[in-house]
Amino acid sequence: MTPLYGIIGYPLSHSFSPAYFNEKFKRQKINALYKTFELRNINEFPELLKREKQLSGLNVTIPYKQSVLQYLDALDANAAETGAVNCIRFKEGLLKGFNTDVTGFEKSLKPLLKDHHQNALILGSGGGSLAVQFVLKKLNVQFSVVSRNRQLTYESLTDDMIETHTVIINTTPVGMYPNVKEMPGIPYAKIGHKHLLYDLIYNPEETKFLQAGEERGAQIKNGFEMLQLQAEESWKIWNG
């Protein structure tokens, strides 16, 4: 039986993972297949497990990085600490959750940080945000989380806050393909050359959020390297 890997989330038409992993299988002459599994609700997850008996590993993306935890038998330290999972290993009938976003984000962000990058704004409070928060704590970067359902909302952001928080990280899907004309509602006027704008989105390559930063002299980075790094980490977990 051909080992099957895949990704769960909704929607998944934009997913980079199938092409990435299937090319990897082909290149390394591995007999395996990677597929997308769109779930309109996380309640469909048990049915997927029943249907796809040859599953050997899964990635998890928006919006299920937190809600999938209820179906897992164990968590690694990063997943337990963040409360979010983006990689599941199937082994001896047990499902163990991992957070490889943590590794991918840390390795991608760390080389970009400069001495003046002491304070960050994290846009969004979902599963991706939890991994970002975990990494910033580890790197001793102070941060505030901006979200519609938090004390710090987009409407309450001031020019002064933008000026003093020189790292701004978008963890939301705002601006992701196909909604490429959208951008997070923050005051962009005070962004300057000391700022680092990081977007977890990788499609499009340069979101409106990143374009706005670049136009004002900020350093910018999209989520593609993070994605590659976390994918490689997933592969190690599945085959370690």
Image (cartoon, grey):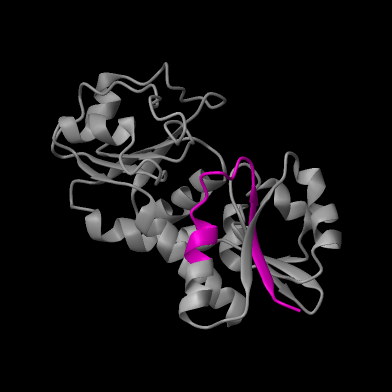
Residues 150 and 123: in front is 123
- Is residue 9 left or right of 217 when viewed as pictured? right
Image point (64%, 41%), residue name: 10
Residue 133 as seen in the image, left or right of residue 95:
left
- The residue at 84%/60% (across/down) is 51
Give the farthest residue toward the top: 155
> Residue 28, image x and y in percent?
48, 82
Q: Quadrant of residue 208?
A: top left
What percent of the width, then of the height, locates residue 179?
Answer: 45, 28
Q: Name which residue lies at 30% across and 41% down.
A: 119
In the rendered image, which quarter contains the N terminus?
Answer: bottom right
- Depth order, front residue of 6/118: 6
Q: Is residue 131 left or right of residue 116?
A: right
Specify whether residue 15 is painted magenta: yes
Q: Which image quadrant is residue 198 in? A: top left
Q: Is residue 235 above or below residue 133?
A: below
- State yes or no: residue 134 in magenta: no
Whether residue 58 is visible to the viewer of this picture, yes or no, is no
Q: Is residue 115 left or right of residue 228?
A: left
Work out whether 102 lies above or below 118. below
Q: Position of residue 200 (x, y in %)?
A: 41, 46
Q: In the rendered view, would you say 77 is above or below 175?
A: below
The answer to whether residue 210 of the structure is visible from this angle is: yes
226 and 195: which one is in front? 226
Count of numbered labels shown in the rendering: 0
Query: Which quadrant would the C terminus be assigned to in this image?
Result: bottom right
Magenta stretch, residue numbers: 1-21
Q: Whole-percent x and y of residue 106?
A: 38, 60
